[in-house]
Image (spheres, rainbow, N blue to C red):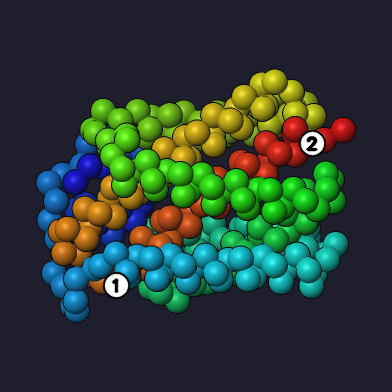
Amino acid sequence: MRTSSNPAFKSLSKGGHANFNYGQPPGGSFGAGGQAPTAPKQAGRPLTIDDVVTKTATTLAITIGTAAATYFVAGPQAVALALPAALVGFVLALVNIFKKKVSPALVIAYSAVEGVFLGGISYMFASMVNPGIIMQALAGTMGVFAAMLVVYKTGAIRVTPKLTKWIIGAAAGAFTLMLINLVAGFFVEGGLGIRDSDGGPLAIGFSLLCIGIAAFVFLLDFDEADRAIKNGVDAQHSWYIAFSLMVTLIWLYLEILRLLSYLQSD
């Protein structure tokens, strides 16, 4: 099994959970070369595609539900909830990644907290630009996800070892630039300019790049899910796969939301 961009699939390729040789940015872990697939011992029935779909739909529904509640109920206070929720979500993500045994409760908690974060961030962008930007970002996210699923299922793009390394390298480079830009922002206004709130050409180009990378990460995710199913991984791992897919979906939504804010700002 090839090394995945997401922690869930990378760990499944080695018959367990986390592999800690590489850093874990929001889109997953980056590394090179996986080992031969070894299915973990089963405590119950083997994983099926229905398990993956059901758990992913469940976590997605929880995230959307808490995001909507935060957006509409908290109102202007929703923005203040974004940072605490982001910090708690980051901690929960690390726990889910490093925990040796998958915990449905922790995956559900992560989904709920990330929903609060997304609700706050969405309210902020809606206030700065216009409320319609939220539905546009959601439609764009689901559209990219569906398109990449079709691309994968039809075999239009094959997930080869070379493509896997290219995607992992591109994602690692993008997150490295984000970190450098964050640090540079403490010394120079606007940092490197890749997250310029005014939406300059560099910022727009970088957002488009991130959207493209996130889209290709889905190909790795789908491929690794297929391999996990074929290798007879225990059905309980469907929660971990759902968590991993949610990480990529959230990243993609945030990048599309940011791009739309650039294009629609005055």
Task: Measuring from the top left, give residue 16's x and y in whole percent.
Answer: 23, 60
The quarter of the picture where residue 90 lies is: bottom right
Q: Quadrant of residue 161?
A: top left
Quick one: SS at disc 1?
helix
Q: Residue at x 47, y 71 (%)?
A: 58
Residue at 32 percent of width and 69 percent of height: 50
What amino acid is at disc 2? Answer: Gln
Q: Is residue 212 above or below residue 62?
A: above
Q: Residues within 10 Å of mark 1 (few under 14, many from 20)?
A: many
Label 1 – label 2 distance at C-alpha: 43 Å
Q: Residues within 10 Å of mark 2 (few under 14, many from 20)?
A: few
- The answer to whether the residues at label 1 and label 2 have Cβ atoms under 8 Å apart is no
29 or 249, which is in the foreground? 249
Q: Nearer the viewer, mark 1 or mark 2?
A: 2
Determine which residue is flagged by label 2.
264
Q: Quadrant of the C terminus?
A: top right
Answer whether residue 180 is visible to the viewer in this image. Answer: no
Kindly identify which numbered label has been placed on residue 151. none
User: Which circle marks residue 236 in the picture?
Assistant: 1
Q: Amino acid at mark 1?
A: Gln
Residue 219: x %, y % from top left = 36, 43
Percent x, y for residue 238?
33, 67
Residue 233 visible in the picture: yes
Q: Residue furthest front?
A: 154
